[in-house]
């Protein structure tokens, strides 16, 4: 627990149960790396428009923007995955 001080929220470090931490970890990671993740989307924006509307891209880039719904979070993460995959294709 001491090793993760400053890296994980206190509620995660000192939890009492053995609940699944996947979503809490993902949210903490996203908060810490939001600018980097948005940059990945921006770098691949032109290629993303072949698969996703401009409106969806704008919505994902603005997230959370007061909308913390599962649908908005899911859109952001799906776009990150697609943009990262597209970017990985550049090296081939």
Image: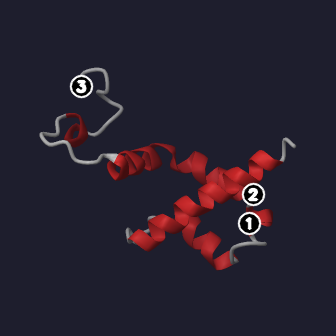
Q: Is residue 7 left or right of residue 40?
A: left
Where residue 89 appears, x then y in whole percent?
81, 49
Which of the 4 quarters of the picture holds residue 32?
top left
Q: Which residue is mark 2?
A: 44
Q: Which mark is residue 48?
A: 1
Residue shown at the point (69%, 78%) measured from the top left: 53
Picture layout, residue 76 above or below residue 43: below
Residue shown at the point (31%, 27%) measured from the top left: 4
- Mark 1 and mark 3: span between their CA atoms? 40 Å
Q: Which comes sooner in the sequence, label 3 or label 2?
A: 3
Q: Which mark is residue 1?
A: 3
Mark 1 is surrounded, within 10 Å at the Cα level, by few (under 14), some (14 to 19) or many (20 or more) other residues, namely: some
Residues at circles 2 and 1 in contact by the CB criterion of under 8 Å:
yes
- Mark 2 and mark 1: span between their CA atoms? 6 Å
Of residues 79 and 45, which is closer to you in this image? 79
Where residue 60 appears, x then y in whole percent?
56, 67
Picture layout, residue 61 above or below residue 89: below
Residue shown at the point (38%, 68%) measured from the top left: 68
Q: Secondary structure at mark 3?
A: loop
- Mark 3 and mark 2: span between their CA atoms? 38 Å
Of residues 68 and 50, which is closer to you in this image? 50
């Amino acid at each position: 627990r001491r090793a993760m001080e400053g890296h994980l929220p206190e509620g995660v470090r000192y939890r009492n149960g053995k609940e699944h931490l996947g979503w809490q970890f993902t949210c903490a990671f996203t908060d810490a790396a939001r600018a980097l993740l948005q940059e990945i989307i921006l770098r691949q924006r032109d290629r993303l428009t072949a698969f996703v509307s401009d409106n969806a891209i704008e919505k994902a880039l603005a997230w959370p923007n007061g909308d913390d719904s599962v649908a908005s979070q899911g859109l952001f993460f799906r776009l990150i995955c697609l943009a990262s995959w597209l970017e990985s294709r550049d090296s081939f």
